[in-house]
Amino acid sequence: MSRQIKIDMSFASNVLYVRQTVAKSFGISINQEFTWELLERLVLDSDVLLATPSILVQGRSQLAIRLPKEDDALGALLQKITHLYPDKRILVMLH
């Protein structure tokens, strides 16, 4: 199992890309469309989240410009993870 979950939003250009990238990063099958509510439940219950000590997020600055509502939703998810799993390290690369 990887020691780090990687979420790269550097090239996110639409809602589908953002949500499927988040799903794939946490080992969730992308055989459906996701609302943030559904995605949040799936992520918080994922075995990958429970087994991995850190999360690396790249491209949030680009995401905030291109799709600010999706960036807000991703930020809210990361905050919820931090609240529920305070031992998880979340690293956000600025570039």
Image (cartoon, rainbow, N blue to C red):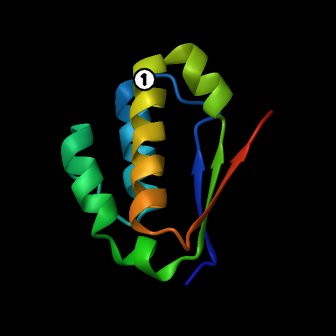
71, above or below 31, in the image? above
Tell me where residue 14 appears, x and y as whole percent: 42, 23
What's under tag 1, amino acid-wise?
Asn
When asked about the image quadrant of residue 50, the answer is: bottom left
The residue furthest right is 95
Splitting the image into 4 quarters, where does residue 11 fall?
top right
Query: Which residue appears farthest toward the top when viewing the image?
Result: 65
Looking at the picture, does residue 2 appear above or below residue 85? below
Q: Nearer the viewer, residue 75 or 12?
A: 75
Secondary structure of the residue carrying numbered label 1: loop
Residue visible at 59% across and 15% down in the picture: 65
Could you tell me which residue is drawn at 42 percent across and 63 percent down? Answer: 26
Q: Is residue 3 above or below residue 65?
A: below
> Is any part of residue 69 visible from this angle?
yes
Nearer to the camera, 86 or 89: 86
Q: Residue at x 47, y 82 (%)?
A: 51
Q: Nearer the viewer, residue 82 or 51?
A: 82
Q: Quadrant of the C terminus?
A: top right
Quarter holding the N terminus is bottom right
The answer to whether 41 appears left or right of 79 in the picture is left
Q: Is residue 53 above or below residue 81?
A: below
Q: Position of residue 69 (x, y in %)?
A: 40, 21
Horizontal and vertical percent for residue 90? 62, 57
Q: Which residue is mark 1?
A: 14
